[in-house]
Amino acid sequence: MDYYKLIEASCRSVDLDFDENKYSQFVEYKNLIQEWNEKINLTAITDDEGIMKKHFIDSIKVFNFPELHNAKSVVDIGTGAGFPGVPMKIVRPDMEIVLLDSLMKRVNFLNEVIAKLGLEGIKAVHGRAEDFAKVEYRDHFDAAVSRAVANMTLLTELCLPFVKVGGYFVAMKGPGAEAEIEEARQAIGMLGGKLDQVIEVEIEESDLKHNLVVVRKVKPTPKQFPRKPGVAAKKPLK
């Protein structure tokens, strides 16, 4: 399989440029994932095709939301092995990106990725969203993104405080997200957001699909949110 052409087609579908240098960064990233995955649990998907399609192209497809092209600063909440934040940085090197994760081992991995790929304007931060949304990163970013971390109600409480009024929170969700979205509507409003749209995304040369759930921040998030670590999961907003 020609992975260069596959990723190039994916980028072209969302109006992004692609070249040999960017492809080389993806290949190095893939190699690091496979190498580190033998030491720490980064992902259950370890084959070349799976990583390219289910992680890299899946992450690039966040740009199916057109307004994200205008974002200059993005925070990736619960980034894990760097998805979608690192692929976003590779294809849009002008973006300022913060990768936030609660596990130091993953942050160490991400720091090596950043160094080996020669990426600038991106940093990995060790910590919890509940803490960092209370200090310097509150109302700081044009957009927050998150992939497969938690349900929409919890995710919105964790992510929306990071976003400037007028900015967006984009959650990458599986194909059956309607009930979850409906359940989160009231919480989204309480947190200063408004459901903007749901965009169905397809991955080239596969039957993989997911949804981008887009929330626009229309007013400041009340200061009591996010609540202390663990509270939002135990007592979801209704």
Image (tube, rainbow, N blue to C red):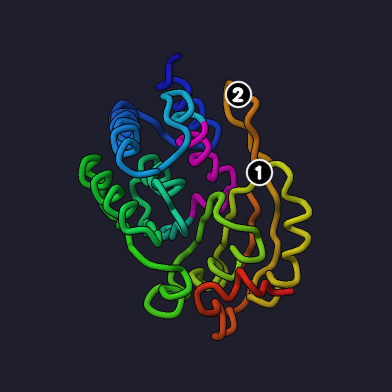
Q: Position of residue 180 (x, y in %)?
A: 73, 56
**Residue that lies at the very extreme toward the front in this rendered image:** 39
In the rendered image, the vertical position of residue 46 relative to residue 97, given as above or below: above
Is 53 included in the stretch rendered in magenta?
no
Secondary structure at badge 1 equals loop
Figure quadrant of residue 5: top left
Mark 2 lies on residue = 206
Mark 1 lies on residue = 174
The quarter in which the N terminus is drawn is top left
Query: Please, what is the three-letter code of the amino acid marked with disc 1?
Result: Gly
Query: Please, what is the three-letter code of the amino acid marked with disc 2?
Result: Ser
Q: Is residue 202 left or right of residue 112?
A: right
In the rendered image, the vertical position of residue 23 relative to residue 173, given as above or below: above
Dominant secondary structure (helix, strand or loop) of the stretch shown in magenta: helix
- The span picked out in magenta is 54-70
Mark 2 closeness class: few <14, some 14–19, many ≥20 residues within 10 Å: few
Q: Is residue 224 visible?
A: yes
Mark 2 vs mark 1: which is more N-terminal?
1
Q: Position of residue 10 (x, y in %)?
A: 51, 30
